[in-house]
Amino acid sequence: LFAARKVVSSLFHGVEKDTYQELHTLLDSVFTNVVLNEEITRADKARVFGVNLVGNLVKASQNLQDISPQLVGIASPALFVPGGAKSEEPLTTDSLSALVTRFLRGLMAFPGHGICFKQYGLYTPPRRLIGNADGAGAADEAEDDMQDVATFSKNSASTEMQDLCNSQILRILVVCINPSISRHMSSLAIDIMRASPELIAPFWRNYHCSFEPRLSLSYLRNTGFAIKVMSLPLPIPQESEARFSAPPRLNTLVEHITPYPLDPSLLDRGLGVSTAPLVRYRNLLLVDMALRKLGETRAWIRAEARAAGGSDANKWTQLDQRLLAVVKQRIPHCKNIVSIHQHLLSLAEQGGSQASDDLREAECQHAVFSNALMRVMSGYQAHFGELVLEVHFEFGTLISGIYLPDVVSVGKRVTERIRNPMNAHTLLYLLHALNTTPSALVKWMTRVKSTDGDTPHTYMGVILMVYLFAVQAELRLAARSVAVSALQSTGLFDHELSGDEAKCWLDALSMMASPHAGRNTRLSFIADGGIAKGRGLVSFLEDAVLLSSKLPYKYADRIHASAPIDGDDDDRLPFSPLLSAVVEAVILRLAFGAKSQGSNWREAPPKRISGEMQTTDMCTFVSEVVCRVSESRGMEVTRRLSRFVAMAAGLTLAPRIAKLDGDKNPQKVEDEKRYCAKIESAFVETTQGTVDYLLTAMAGVATTQKPVPIGGGVGGAVDTLLKRELVSACANIEDRLSELISQMATVLREHELSVEAITGWLLEQASVASGGEQQAACIATITWISAYHRTSLNGHSLWDMSAFVDLAPEILQIDDTSFLLSMFRHLLGSKSLVALVSDNLGVQRLLAHVLLANKGSLQFCCYAVQLVRCIASRTPGADDGQVSRALSFAFALVYEHLASMDDRAQSLEQYSSWLSPF
């Protein structure tokens, strides 16, 4: 029968006239006894199921009338899936079109079954190479001819077509299956090319359809089908498959990215059709899909180049360069994309005069277009940055259009503008584009007009606000990367190229201002007070960056004058000059600014001034930066930071004192010098404690000193009036943590007490409270300590206070990693560290909770090793049993981290280098 192919094909003549049950019986019998019959070779099946036979079936598929199979005597319609899979629920509604489509899919869309030969993905081996053992394919040519693709006509076929394994399927796909007829045919064509991706390149060379940009159903169908084909995943070899030694052919890759019929001139015309927004939008989608596919392809090529190494890597690198050159010729000119952006801006300026309904439609259309446009521009910047430079387009100008209420959940709306969630997605692609743009090309300190009536920010400030307050973690992560590049572009971090110190600044800012920092839950709402605090810190940092970038040598000279250590002739900066500028801004604003406390401080003792300094966000920010930079850079930098902190205030106030020498009022000069001396003393007392306990934790101090009780050395007893005021300040603390701090600071100033007094009182309240009141008091205590308590308590750590140690179980209830890490840092500076870690169960649980929160994370690995180092350095004079138990517990935490690391060998080597001294 198969030798007489006409006999078999005649069975399918006139099938379009058959009833549903007749055609179902025929197709089910043919599929079971022929298509799935392994005794019939696949080549014989391909010769029988040719263009004419399938063409007759396609005629039958034009009948879209719905039929109930059960009513015509078919209990379970055939699915035509190799392996005999059945639907869990029988089809209740079917049609001739769906029936034929399922049969053709089972015939041509399952490699190794029917007439579909095994697929080779990007490698298109002709028949003569199927038995080649190494499977190198046909990619050994030095150069690819872009026209060297399988083509055929009615009377002839190219050599590549004759050698193509699935050439019969290609003929059927081009001649019989018209994707624009129906959804069934379009879905069938997509499934065939997904199963045999080597057919995509020859399909586009042989399939003739119009992509002329005009608003018609034909154009929409064709572009929709093209987008679906372009969105098919790149058929790269999987890990379990044999990998080919040579790169694939260039022409095959190009057709997967930019199909041959999509001529760049057509795309240029489509992008220029301003009267038909849908046509313009479709062209943006086509370009966007091509650039996305290019990104996936280049990522795979680079991975293969790294894996190949040697001379083979050069082949992959050359393929990447040639691929970029060809795709560059197939995409529209960048100026057409920029013209769309300018058109959107002009429409946005005209939108204010429209009616409310028209305005809503215009804003939604603007959001959709902006999203597609930003994806395209991000792709151009990532792969063809030179094209963006040619049209003089600056991505930094787009930062001014960021509308923060669209990406930040705030308490109230300041305008009636529609909040479109797509804007957050658009912003993500803008951040990706900024991340690939050379930072030198963005004017980060350009001021932008405020969109909500608040203090205007620079480009850098807007990115920092997104980093602090964006709801989506993806936005915050992308903004962090952009902010690091922006800080490094100022030249203030040229002393180290890794960007670690810039990250320390951002982490400190996040801990101080971001409600998302260290939390395990996603916040969908942020109070206006939290936004205002973050905006103030961002503005403060912006001003310091702007000032220090204009006068970098001034602040670098201050570091060299204060920070060098005896015998050290290294002229390199140990840390950024930005720290010197920030310290100067803090001192001048607090002591002499328009909103300073100078009038109250001139007669106050230094201890009171120091206490009030500790309650300011700016001083706390400086202490947090010093803490993080010290932990990141090590002992030597910490020592130089200690010297700098001790002398920074004096160097800052020296020019102000020098100007007083010519003043004719000696009393005024003497008063001003005395006031400057108090400010210098207060600032040193405020910040020096941070460096002191870090140096103590790094070097280790041998002691067996017992914990000190509350009331001794923490500011004395708190009187009844102060207690009443503090109780009033702590009322409803769960809802007003930010207000609590300002009220406590007010109480502190009125009673001229130190921060330690309030800390001690809070600890007393937490120790005697119970239930929810204890948790509220604990939250207040940790908030107070984490935000405003960085100094040691008369030489003691917080963990040297017995009441604070008793709070360890309650501290675990705080779902904020930044708070817990702050408590960990204080613990490292405790003189009772060995005793606490060895015997206190609450402290052990707290350490396990904090250090194992992110097992395998390099930062938390360092924390675990730092704990071992601090315990080991305190062994002289300590009880041997306590030291042994403490080290055993600390090493158990290290082992937990080691067990979760992916690269065990590299982890062992790094841990051994860390721990070998102990």
Image: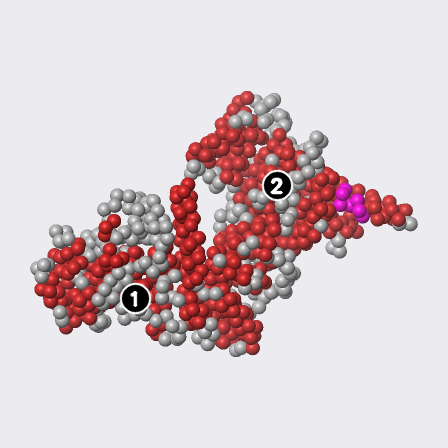
Image height check: is 568 above or below 546?
A: above
Question: Is residue 85 found left or right of 743 in the rendered image?
Answer: left
Q: Which residues are magenta?
A: 650-656
Residue 740 location in percent, x, y? Answer: 63, 50
N-term-proximal mark, 1 vs 2: 1
Question: Is residue 410 found left or right of 713 in the rendered image?
Answer: left
Between 260 and 675, the one nearer to me in the picture: 260
Question: Is residue 171 found left or right of 282 in the rendered image?
Answer: left
Assign a secondary structure to mark 1. loop
User: Looking at the image, how many numbered discs can be counted on the residues?
Assistant: 2
Q: Residue at x 30, y 44 (%)?
A: 242
Image height check: is 427 above or below 630?
A: below
Mark 1 in CB contact with mark 2 (< 8 angstroms)? no
Q: Dot 1 corresponds to which residue?
A: 207
Q: Residue at x 40, y 57 (%)?
A: 293
Quadrant in the picture for residue 868: top right
**Could you give the CA–CA distance between mark 1 and mark 2, rounded to whole angstroms?**
62 Å
Between 308 and 662, the one nearer to me in the picture: 308
Residue 26 location in percent, x, y? Answer: 12, 64
Is residue 474 visible to us here? yes
Image height check: is 493 above or below 376?
A: above
Q: Which mark is residue 629?
A: 2
Q: Residue at x 52, y 61 (%)?
A: 388
Assign a secondary structure to mark 2. helix
Between 690 and 100, the one nearer to me in the picture: 100
**Extreme-right residue of the structure:** 664
Is residue 98 visible to us here? no
Between 246 and 666, the one nearer to me in the picture: 246
Residue type at numbered disc 2: Val
Q: Residue at x 58, y 35 (%)?
A: 827
Residue 706 location in percent, x, y? Answer: 62, 28
Quadrant that contains the C terminus: top right
